[in-house]
Image (cartoon, rainbow, N blue to C red):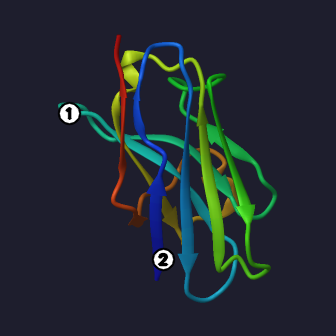
């Protein structure tokens, strides 16, 4: 079981920055994949970025590569608790969406690092709005 709680969304102008945070708590121990999805009205949900708890390799969607950075703090040694971040720079109006953090306990690291994972567990989401 995994619980995820996001914070940090808001409204900004194009070109500005935001930092999203997510506390990820799981029962049990072991390494797993986690990251961020976004859902905009009328569009399919998009996997924005992912990171595996072992190794630290990351994956980014082409639409955010070079502007967004995913990172994490391992709060407990058994990976039972992590804080996940998404630093978003040079925001564009097309980045407007509901962002939610997610976790997938099943995929191996090499799948996570290619963005081949799913939001088996997800938080409630935080709204990001970019407009002038």
Residue 104 left/right relative to 95: right
Please name the residue that numbered disc 2 is placed on: 2
SS label for mark 2: strand
Q: CA distance from mark 1 to mark 2?
A: 26 Å
Q: Is residue 129 above or below residue 13?
A: below
Question: Which residue is pictured at 20% across the width and 33% down the height?
Answer: 41
Quick one: label 1 or label 2, which is nearer the N terminus? 2
Question: Considering only vertical position in the picture, is 65 above or below 114?
Answer: above
**Residue 100: x percent and y percent?**
41, 51
**Pointers 1 and 2 in contact (C-beta within 8 Å):** no
Instruction: Report the quarter where the C terminus lies.
Output: top left
Estimate the x, y position of residue 82 in percent, counting from the top left: 65, 68
* Quarter residue 29 falls in: bottom right
Q: Residues within 10 Å of mark 1 (few under 14, many from 20)?
A: few
Residue under numbered circle 1: 41
> Residue at position x 46%, y 74% from top?
3
């Amino acid at each position: 079981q995994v619980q995820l709680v996001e914070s940090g969304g808001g409204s900004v102008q194009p070109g500005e920055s935001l930092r999203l945070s997510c506390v990820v708590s799981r029962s049990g121990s072991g390494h797993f994949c986690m990251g961020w999805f976004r859902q905009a009205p009328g569009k399919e949900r998009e996997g924005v970025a992912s990171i595996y708890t072992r190794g630290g390799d990351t994956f980014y969607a082409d639409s955010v590569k070079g502007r967004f950075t995913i990172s994490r703090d391992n709060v407990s040694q058994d990976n039972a608790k992590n804080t996940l971040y998404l630093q978003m720079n040079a925001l564009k109006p097309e980045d407007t969406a509901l962002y939610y953090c997610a976790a997938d306990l099943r995929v191996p690291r090499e799948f996570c690092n290619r963005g081949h994972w799913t939001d088996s567990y997800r938080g409630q989401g935080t709204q990001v709005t970019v407009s002038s």
